[in-house]
Image (tube, coloured by chain):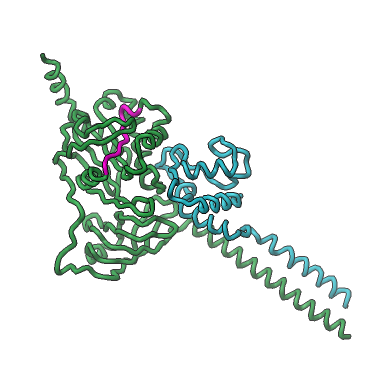
Protein backbone atom coordinates (compact mmCIF):
# COMPACT_ATOMS: atom_id res chain seq x y z
CA UNK A 1 0.00 0.00 0.00
CA UNK A 2 2.78 2.35 1.03
CA UNK A 3 4.72 1.39 -2.08
CA UNK A 4 1.70 2.06 -4.29
CA UNK A 5 1.14 5.37 -2.58
CA UNK A 6 4.75 6.32 -3.10
CA UNK A 7 4.56 5.54 -6.82
CA UNK A 8 1.33 7.48 -7.13
CA UNK A 9 2.89 10.41 -5.31
CA UNK A 10 5.95 10.46 -7.54
CA UNK A 11 3.78 10.22 -10.67
CA UNK A 12 1.58 13.09 -9.55
CA UNK A 13 4.56 15.13 -8.45
CA UNK A 14 6.10 14.72 -11.93
CA UNK A 15 2.78 15.63 -13.52
CA UNK A 16 2.57 18.73 -11.36
CA UNK A 17 6.10 19.68 -12.38
CA UNK A 18 5.43 19.12 -16.07
CA UNK A 19 2.15 21.03 -16.12
CA UNK A 20 3.46 24.58 -15.84
CA UNK A 21 6.02 23.83 -18.56
CA UNK A 22 3.27 22.61 -20.88
CA UNK A 23 1.19 25.67 -20.08
CA UNK A 24 3.84 28.37 -20.35
CA UNK A 25 2.90 29.83 -23.74
CA UNK A 26 3.74 33.33 -22.56
CA UNK A 27 7.34 33.78 -21.51
CA UNK A 28 8.04 35.53 -18.26
CA UNK A 29 8.77 39.21 -18.90
CA UNK A 30 11.10 41.38 -16.87
CA UNK A 31 10.02 44.85 -15.79
CA UNK A 32 11.90 46.47 -18.71
CA UNK A 33 10.34 44.02 -21.14
CA UNK A 34 6.89 44.78 -19.73
CA UNK A 35 7.58 48.48 -20.31
CA UNK A 36 8.74 47.58 -23.80
CA UNK A 37 5.56 45.64 -24.41
CA UNK A 38 3.40 48.64 -23.45
CA UNK A 39 5.43 50.85 -25.82
CA UNK A 40 5.15 48.19 -28.51
CA UNK A 41 1.36 48.10 -28.18
CA UNK A 42 1.15 51.90 -28.43
CA UNK A 43 3.70 52.63 -31.11
CA UNK A 44 4.51 49.51 -33.12
CA UNK A 45 1.45 47.27 -33.06
CA UNK A 46 -0.83 49.74 -34.90
CA UNK A 47 1.24 49.16 -38.07
CA UNK A 48 3.10 45.91 -37.46
CA UNK A 49 0.05 43.89 -36.48
CA UNK A 50 -3.07 43.29 -38.53
CA UNK A 51 -3.52 43.92 -42.24
CA UNK A 52 -3.27 47.35 -43.81
CA UNK A 53 -4.37 47.04 -47.41
CA UNK A 54 -4.33 50.83 -47.85
CA UNK A 55 -0.62 51.11 -47.08
CA UNK A 56 1.87 51.20 -49.91
CA UNK A 57 4.17 48.73 -48.20
CA UNK A 58 2.95 46.17 -45.70
CA UNK A 59 4.80 46.64 -42.40
CA UNK A 60 6.60 43.37 -41.59
CA UNK A 61 5.56 41.24 -38.62
CA UNK A 62 8.11 41.53 -35.82
CA UNK A 63 7.80 38.06 -34.29
CA UNK A 64 11.15 36.32 -34.47
CA UNK A 65 12.91 39.57 -35.43
CA UNK A 66 16.10 38.63 -33.63
CA UNK A 67 15.89 34.94 -34.50
CA UNK A 68 17.09 35.48 -38.04
CA UNK A 69 20.45 36.95 -38.97
CA UNK A 70 19.00 39.86 -40.90
CA UNK A 71 16.12 42.28 -40.47
CA UNK A 72 13.33 42.48 -43.06
CA UNK A 73 15.34 45.32 -44.65
CA UNK A 74 18.33 43.01 -45.11
CA UNK A 75 20.42 44.82 -42.49
CA UNK A 76 21.96 42.68 -39.76
CA UNK A 77 19.59 41.89 -36.89
CA UNK A 78 21.52 43.68 -34.18
CA UNK A 79 20.29 45.83 -31.30
CA UNK A 80 22.12 48.83 -32.76
CA UNK A 81 20.45 48.44 -36.15
CA UNK A 82 16.97 48.00 -34.67
CA UNK A 83 17.52 51.01 -32.42
CA UNK A 84 18.60 53.07 -35.44
CA UNK A 85 15.52 51.99 -37.42
CA UNK A 86 13.20 52.95 -34.56
CA UNK A 87 14.77 56.39 -34.12
CA UNK A 88 15.40 57.31 -37.75
CA UNK A 89 12.64 55.35 -39.44
CA UNK A 90 13.22 53.41 -42.62
CA UNK A 91 11.40 53.63 -45.92
CA UNK A 92 7.78 54.39 -45.14
CA UNK A 93 8.25 53.62 -41.44
CA UNK A 94 8.10 56.91 -39.52
CA UNK A 95 10.98 58.06 -37.33
CA UNK A 96 10.39 57.98 -33.58
CA UNK A 97 13.09 60.60 -33.13
CA UNK A 98 12.32 62.83 -30.07
CA UNK A 99 9.19 60.76 -29.46
CA UNK A 100 10.75 57.92 -27.50
CA UNK A 101 13.49 58.35 -24.91
CA UNK A 102 16.71 56.33 -25.06
CA UNK A 103 15.36 54.24 -22.20
CA UNK A 104 12.09 53.65 -24.07
CA UNK A 105 14.02 52.41 -27.10
CA UNK A 106 16.11 50.10 -24.90
CA UNK A 107 12.95 48.63 -23.35
CA UNK A 108 11.39 48.20 -26.77
CA UNK A 109 14.44 46.37 -28.10
CA UNK A 110 14.42 44.12 -25.01
CA UNK A 111 10.78 43.29 -25.63
CA UNK A 112 11.38 42.65 -29.33
CA UNK A 113 13.92 40.01 -28.26
CA UNK A 114 11.13 38.11 -26.47
CA UNK A 115 8.94 37.91 -29.58
CA UNK A 116 9.45 34.43 -30.95
CA UNK B 1 2.62 4.45 11.86
CA UNK B 2 3.34 8.13 12.08
CA UNK B 3 5.56 7.79 9.03
CA UNK B 4 2.76 6.30 6.92
CA UNK B 5 0.32 8.98 8.09
CA UNK B 6 2.83 11.60 7.03
CA UNK B 7 3.07 9.92 3.63
CA UNK B 8 -0.67 10.03 3.24
CA UNK B 9 -0.77 13.72 4.14
CA UNK B 10 2.13 14.34 1.78
CA UNK B 11 0.34 12.45 -0.95
CA UNK B 12 -2.79 14.50 -0.41
CA UNK B 13 -0.84 17.74 -0.61
CA UNK B 14 0.80 16.65 -3.84
CA UNK B 15 -2.51 15.54 -5.31
CA UNK B 16 -4.00 18.90 -4.37
CA UNK B 17 -1.10 20.79 -5.90
CA UNK B 18 -1.35 18.77 -9.10
CA UNK B 19 -5.03 19.54 -9.21
CA UNK B 20 -4.33 23.24 -8.79
CA UNK B 21 -1.72 23.14 -11.53
CA UNK B 22 -4.22 21.52 -13.85
CA UNK B 23 -6.91 24.04 -12.94
CA UNK B 24 -4.38 26.86 -13.48
CA UNK B 25 -3.50 25.41 -16.82
CA UNK B 26 -7.14 25.14 -17.78
CA UNK B 27 -7.64 28.76 -16.82
CA UNK B 28 -4.65 29.76 -18.90
CA UNK B 29 -6.01 27.78 -21.81
CA UNK B 30 -9.31 29.53 -21.34
CA UNK B 31 -7.50 32.85 -21.40
CA UNK B 32 -5.72 31.89 -24.55
CA UNK B 33 -8.99 30.80 -26.12
CA UNK B 34 -10.57 34.08 -25.05
CA UNK B 35 -7.65 36.03 -26.55
CA UNK B 36 -7.95 34.06 -29.77
CA UNK B 37 -11.67 34.75 -29.84
CA UNK B 38 -11.13 38.46 -29.21
CA UNK B 39 -8.87 38.60 -32.22
CA UNK B 40 -11.95 38.05 -34.32
CA UNK B 41 -14.17 40.43 -32.41
CA UNK B 42 -14.43 44.18 -32.20
CA UNK B 43 -12.23 45.96 -29.71
CA UNK B 44 -13.59 48.61 -27.37
CA UNK B 45 -11.67 51.52 -25.90
CA UNK B 46 -12.73 54.23 -23.48
CA UNK B 47 -12.80 57.72 -24.91
CA UNK B 48 -13.06 60.97 -22.95
CA UNK B 49 -13.10 64.32 -24.65
CA UNK B 50 -14.94 67.37 -25.83
CA UNK B 51 -17.18 67.63 -28.86
CA UNK B 52 -15.88 70.36 -31.17
CA UNK B 53 -18.27 69.88 -34.09
CA UNK B 54 -21.13 67.71 -35.22
CA UNK B 55 -22.57 66.75 -38.56
CA UNK B 56 -26.01 65.36 -37.84
CA UNK B 57 -26.66 64.47 -41.49
CA UNK B 58 -23.55 62.30 -41.61
CA UNK B 59 -24.12 60.99 -38.04
CA UNK B 60 -20.71 62.22 -37.05
CA UNK B 61 -19.21 64.19 -34.22
CA UNK B 62 -15.69 65.60 -34.09
CA UNK B 63 -14.13 65.03 -30.69
CA UNK B 64 -11.02 66.51 -29.15
CA UNK B 65 -10.13 63.56 -26.99
CA UNK B 66 -7.55 62.46 -24.48
CA UNK B 67 -5.17 59.62 -25.21
CA UNK B 68 -6.97 56.34 -25.83
CA UNK B 69 -4.45 53.83 -24.46
CA UNK B 70 -3.76 51.06 -26.93
CA UNK B 71 -5.59 52.79 -29.77
CA UNK B 72 -4.74 56.41 -30.36
CA UNK B 73 -2.87 59.41 -29.06
CA UNK B 74 -4.80 62.46 -27.88
CA UNK B 75 -6.16 64.26 -30.91
CA UNK B 76 -9.14 65.87 -32.58
CA UNK B 77 -10.92 63.75 -35.13
CA UNK B 78 -14.38 62.87 -36.43
CA UNK B 79 -16.18 59.74 -35.31
CA UNK B 80 -19.30 58.09 -36.65
CA UNK B 81 -22.03 57.53 -34.07
CA UNK B 82 -24.39 54.67 -34.73
CA UNK B 83 -27.18 56.03 -32.59
CA UNK B 84 -28.88 58.98 -34.33
CA UNK B 85 -30.53 60.14 -31.09
CA UNK B 86 -27.11 60.65 -29.56
CA UNK B 87 -26.00 62.82 -32.46
CA UNK B 88 -29.09 64.96 -32.02
CA UNK B 89 -28.48 65.26 -28.30
CA UNK B 90 -24.82 66.23 -28.12
CA UNK B 91 -23.71 69.75 -28.91
CA UNK B 92 -20.29 71.20 -29.61
CA UNK B 93 -18.68 72.07 -26.31
CA UNK B 94 -20.15 69.09 -24.46
CA UNK B 95 -17.70 66.89 -22.61
CA UNK B 96 -18.38 63.23 -23.27
CA UNK B 97 -17.33 59.72 -22.37
CA UNK B 98 -17.90 56.96 -24.90
CA UNK B 99 -16.70 53.62 -26.17
CA UNK B 100 -14.69 53.58 -29.37
CA UNK B 101 -15.53 50.35 -31.14
CA UNK B 102 -12.84 49.24 -33.58
CA UNK B 103 -13.34 46.32 -35.93
CA UNK B 104 -10.64 43.74 -35.61
CA UNK B 105 -8.68 44.64 -38.73
CA UNK B 106 -8.87 48.37 -37.92
CA UNK B 107 -10.78 49.11 -41.12
CA UNK B 108 -13.68 50.80 -39.35
CA UNK B 109 -14.46 52.41 -36.03
CA UNK B 110 -17.29 54.31 -34.41
CA UNK B 111 -18.61 55.53 -31.06
CA UNK B 112 -21.11 53.71 -28.90
CA UNK B 113 -22.59 54.40 -25.49
CA UNK B 114 -21.95 58.15 -25.65
CA UNK B 115 -22.56 59.84 -22.27
CA UNK B 116 -22.50 63.61 -21.81
CA UNK B 117 -20.42 64.20 -18.69
CA UNK B 118 -20.58 67.99 -18.77
CA UNK B 119 -22.94 70.05 -20.88
CA UNK B 120 -21.72 73.17 -22.62
CA UNK B 121 -23.57 76.42 -22.00
CA UNK B 122 -25.53 75.65 -25.13
CA UNK B 123 -28.40 78.01 -24.33
CA UNK B 124 -26.14 81.02 -23.87
CA UNK B 125 -23.99 80.59 -26.93
CA UNK B 126 -22.68 77.80 -29.06
CA UNK B 127 -18.89 77.61 -28.97
CA UNK B 128 -17.30 79.13 -32.01
CA UNK B 129 -15.79 76.66 -34.40
CA UNK B 130 -12.11 77.33 -34.73
CA UNK B 131 -12.08 77.95 -38.45
CA UNK B 132 -14.08 78.97 -41.46
CA UNK B 133 -13.39 76.59 -44.30
CA UNK B 134 -13.34 77.89 -47.86
CA UNK B 135 -16.47 76.97 -49.74
CA UNK B 136 -16.31 75.11 -53.01
CA UNK B 137 -15.73 77.74 -55.69
CA UNK B 138 -13.75 80.07 -53.42
CA UNK B 139 -10.16 80.76 -54.38
CA UNK B 140 -7.33 79.51 -52.20
CA UNK B 141 -4.84 82.02 -50.78
CA UNK B 142 -1.61 82.20 -52.75
CA UNK B 143 0.71 81.43 -49.86
CA UNK B 144 4.40 80.55 -50.26
CA UNK B 145 5.69 77.10 -49.36
CA UNK B 146 9.13 75.48 -49.50
CA UNK B 147 9.33 72.11 -51.20
CA UNK B 148 11.53 69.05 -50.75
CA UNK B 149 14.26 70.63 -52.88
CA UNK B 150 14.32 73.78 -50.76
CA UNK B 151 12.64 75.73 -53.56
CA UNK B 152 9.89 78.26 -52.80
CA UNK B 153 6.61 77.46 -54.48
CA UNK B 154 3.19 79.13 -54.40
CA UNK B 155 -0.23 77.56 -54.71
CA UNK B 156 -0.83 79.73 -57.78
CA UNK B 157 2.14 78.01 -59.50
CA UNK B 158 -0.19 75.07 -60.09
CA UNK B 159 -2.90 77.05 -61.84
CA UNK B 160 -3.81 75.39 -65.09
CA UNK B 161 -3.63 71.97 -63.41
CA UNK B 162 -6.01 70.10 -61.17
CA UNK B 163 -4.22 70.04 -57.83
CA UNK B 164 -4.88 67.52 -55.07
CA UNK B 165 -3.62 68.74 -51.68
CA UNK B 166 -3.36 67.02 -48.34
CA UNK B 167 -1.65 67.53 -44.99
CA UNK B 168 0.50 65.06 -43.09
CA UNK B 169 3.55 64.95 -40.85
CA UNK B 170 6.36 62.53 -41.49
CA UNK B 171 6.55 61.10 -37.95
CA UNK B 172 2.84 60.24 -37.87
CA UNK B 173 2.72 56.64 -36.58
CA UNK B 174 -0.96 55.89 -37.16
CA UNK B 175 -1.54 53.73 -40.23
CA UNK B 176 -5.03 55.08 -40.86
CA UNK B 177 -3.83 58.67 -40.93
CA UNK B 178 -0.74 60.10 -42.67
CA UNK B 179 0.75 56.82 -43.93
CA UNK B 180 -2.61 56.01 -45.52
CA UNK B 181 -2.89 59.46 -47.14
CA UNK B 182 0.62 59.25 -48.57
CA UNK B 183 0.06 55.68 -49.75
CA UNK B 184 -3.08 56.77 -51.56
CA UNK B 185 -1.30 59.73 -53.15
CA UNK B 186 1.50 57.37 -54.23
CA UNK B 187 -1.06 55.10 -55.90
CA UNK B 188 -2.61 58.10 -57.67
CA UNK B 189 0.86 59.14 -58.84
CA UNK B 190 1.56 55.66 -60.22
CA UNK B 191 -1.82 55.40 -61.94
CA UNK B 192 -1.76 58.87 -63.47
CA UNK B 193 1.79 58.34 -64.72
CA UNK B 194 0.37 55.63 -66.99
CA UNK B 195 -1.81 58.20 -68.80
CA UNK B 196 0.52 61.04 -69.83
CA UNK B 197 -2.33 63.31 -70.87
CA UNK B 198 -3.91 63.30 -67.40
CA UNK B 199 -0.49 63.27 -65.72
CA UNK B 200 0.40 66.54 -67.45
CA UNK B 201 -2.79 68.22 -66.27
CA UNK B 202 -2.68 67.19 -62.64
CA UNK B 203 -0.40 67.64 -59.65
CA UNK B 204 -0.12 66.41 -56.07
CA UNK B 205 0.91 68.49 -53.07
CA UNK B 206 1.53 67.18 -49.57
CA UNK B 207 1.98 69.83 -46.87
CA UNK B 208 3.43 69.03 -43.46
CA UNK B 209 1.82 69.95 -40.15
CA UNK B 210 5.29 69.81 -38.59
CA UNK B 211 7.51 72.49 -40.20
CA UNK B 212 9.90 72.39 -37.21
CA UNK B 213 10.90 68.78 -37.87
CA UNK B 214 9.89 68.26 -41.49
CA UNK B 215 12.56 70.33 -43.23
CA UNK B 216 13.30 69.99 -46.95
CA UNK B 217 15.74 67.04 -46.52
CA UNK B 218 13.31 65.21 -44.21
CA UNK B 219 10.47 65.73 -46.69
CA UNK B 220 12.70 64.59 -49.55
CA UNK B 221 13.57 61.36 -47.77
CA UNK B 222 9.90 60.83 -46.90
CA UNK B 223 8.79 61.53 -50.47
CA UNK B 224 11.36 59.16 -51.97
CA UNK B 225 10.01 56.32 -49.82
CA UNK B 226 6.63 56.80 -51.49
CA UNK B 227 8.10 57.33 -54.96
CA UNK B 228 10.11 54.10 -54.97
CA UNK B 229 13.29 56.17 -54.68
CA UNK B 230 12.69 57.86 -58.04
CA UNK B 231 13.24 61.61 -57.59
CA UNK B 232 11.67 62.35 -60.99
CA UNK B 233 8.34 61.83 -59.23
CA UNK B 234 8.87 65.15 -57.41
CA UNK B 235 8.05 66.84 -60.74
CA UNK B 236 4.49 65.66 -60.17
CA UNK B 237 4.26 65.47 -56.39
CA UNK B 238 5.61 68.20 -54.14
CA UNK B 239 6.18 67.78 -50.41
CA UNK B 240 6.26 71.16 -48.73
CA UNK B 241 6.47 73.02 -45.45
CA UNK B 242 5.69 76.60 -44.64
CA UNK B 243 5.96 78.99 -41.69
CA UNK B 244 3.81 78.18 -38.65
CA UNK B 245 1.75 81.30 -39.36
CA UNK B 246 1.05 80.45 -43.00
CA UNK B 247 0.41 76.82 -42.05
CA UNK B 248 -2.33 78.01 -39.71
CA UNK B 249 -3.82 80.19 -42.49
CA UNK B 250 -3.78 77.28 -44.95
CA UNK B 251 -5.22 74.84 -42.43
CA UNK B 252 -7.97 77.34 -41.57
CA UNK B 253 -8.75 77.84 -45.25
CA UNK B 254 -9.12 74.09 -45.70
CA UNK B 255 -10.97 73.53 -42.42
CA UNK B 256 -8.23 71.53 -40.72
CA UNK B 257 -7.59 71.45 -36.99
CA UNK B 258 -4.23 70.53 -35.51
CA UNK B 259 -2.21 71.06 -32.38
CA UNK B 260 1.12 69.87 -31.10
CA UNK B 261 1.73 68.07 -27.83
CA UNK B 262 4.58 65.87 -26.61
CA UNK B 263 6.24 65.89 -30.02
CA UNK B 264 3.10 64.53 -31.59
CA UNK B 265 0.62 66.39 -33.70
CA UNK B 266 -3.07 65.76 -33.36
CA UNK B 267 -4.90 66.69 -36.50
CA UNK B 268 -7.98 66.15 -38.57
CA UNK B 269 -7.66 64.88 -42.12
CA UNK B 270 -8.67 66.60 -45.29
CA UNK B 271 -7.97 66.21 -48.97
CA UNK B 272 -8.70 69.23 -51.11
CA UNK B 273 -9.08 69.29 -54.87
CA UNK B 274 -8.22 72.67 -56.35
CA UNK B 275 -9.47 73.33 -59.85
CA UNK B 276 -7.15 74.64 -62.56
CA UNK B 277 -8.54 78.13 -61.95
CA UNK B 278 -7.36 78.04 -58.33
CA UNK B 279 -10.76 77.55 -56.71
CA UNK B 280 -11.67 74.78 -54.30
CA UNK B 281 -13.48 72.06 -56.27
CA UNK B 282 -13.96 69.32 -53.69
CA UNK B 283 -13.18 68.19 -50.15
CA UNK B 284 -12.83 64.76 -48.62
CA UNK B 285 -12.55 64.66 -44.87
CA UNK B 286 -14.54 61.66 -43.69
CA UNK B 287 -14.60 58.82 -46.16
CA UNK B 288 -13.01 58.36 -49.52
CA UNK B 289 -11.32 55.77 -51.68
CA UNK B 290 -8.24 56.14 -53.83
CA UNK B 291 -10.38 55.36 -56.89
CA UNK B 292 -12.78 58.16 -55.99
CA UNK B 293 -9.95 60.68 -55.54
CA UNK B 294 -8.31 59.58 -58.76
CA UNK B 295 -11.53 59.67 -60.77
CA UNK B 296 -12.45 63.15 -59.55
CA UNK B 297 -8.93 64.42 -60.18
CA UNK B 298 -9.00 63.08 -63.74
CA UNK B 299 -12.45 64.57 -64.37
CA UNK B 300 -11.34 67.93 -63.03
CA UNK B 301 -8.29 67.83 -65.32
CA UNK B 302 -10.52 66.76 -68.19
CA UNK B 303 -12.98 69.57 -67.60
CA UNK B 304 -10.08 71.97 -67.82
CA UNK B 305 -8.95 70.42 -71.09
CA UNK B 306 -11.27 72.62 -73.10
CA UNK B 307 -9.95 75.78 -71.47
CA UNK B 308 -6.30 74.83 -71.20
CA UNK B 309 -5.44 74.66 -74.94
CA UNK B 310 -7.14 78.02 -75.42
CA UNK B 311 -4.94 79.56 -72.72
CA UNK B 312 -1.89 77.85 -74.14
CA UNK B 313 -2.56 79.13 -77.61
CA UNK B 314 -3.11 82.63 -76.25
CA UNK B 315 0.27 82.44 -74.58
CA UNK B 316 1.89 81.37 -77.80
CA UNK B 317 0.37 84.29 -79.70
CA UNK B 318 2.97 87.02 -80.00
Q: Is residue B241 rendered magenta in the image?
A: yes
Which residue is drawn at the image coordinates 33% and 60% (left, top)? B65
Report x, y in % for residue A97: 44, 46
Q: Quadrant of residue B137?
A: top left
Provide the letter of the chain coloured green: B
Q: Which residue is nearer to you in this view: B11 or B163?
A: B163
Magenta part of the protein: which range? B233-243
Q: Is residue B21 depicted above or below B239 in this figure?
A: below
Which residue is drawn at the image coordinates 38% and 54% (left, top)? B262
Q: Is residue B274 rendered magenta in the image?
A: no
Q: Which residue is nearer to you in this view: A32 or B226?
A: A32
Q: Which residue is nearer to you in this view: B196 or A34?
A: A34
**Chain A representation colour:** cyan
Give the side of residue B234 with respect to residue B143, left or right: right
Report x, y in % for residue A89: 46, 41
Q: Which residue is nearer to you in this view: B20 or B138?
A: B138
Which residue is drawn at the image coordinates 61% and 58% (left, top)? A26
Report x, y in % for residue A6: 85, 73
Q: Is residue B301 depicted above or below B118 in this figure?
A: above
Q: Quadrant of the N terminus of chain B?
A: bottom right
Report x, y in % for residue B178: 36, 44
Q: Quadrant of the C terminus of chain B?
A: top left
Q: Is residue B266 depicted above or below B120 in this figure?
A: above
Q: Is residue B244 depicted above or below B90 in this figure?
A: above
Give the side of residue B150 with respect to residue B221, left or right: left
Amino acid sequence: MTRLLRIACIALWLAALAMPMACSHQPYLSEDEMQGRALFEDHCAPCHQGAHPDLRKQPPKLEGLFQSKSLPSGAPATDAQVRKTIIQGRGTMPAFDQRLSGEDVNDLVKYLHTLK
Amino acid sequence: MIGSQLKVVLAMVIVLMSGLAIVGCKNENKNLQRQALEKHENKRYNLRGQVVAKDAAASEITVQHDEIPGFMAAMTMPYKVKDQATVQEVEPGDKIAADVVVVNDGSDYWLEDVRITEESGRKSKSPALPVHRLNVGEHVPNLPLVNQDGRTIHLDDFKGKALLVTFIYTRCPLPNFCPRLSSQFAKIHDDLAKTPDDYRKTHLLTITFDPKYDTAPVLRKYGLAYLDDDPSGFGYWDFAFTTPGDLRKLADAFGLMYFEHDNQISHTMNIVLIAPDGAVANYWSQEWTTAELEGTLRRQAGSAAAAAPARASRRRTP
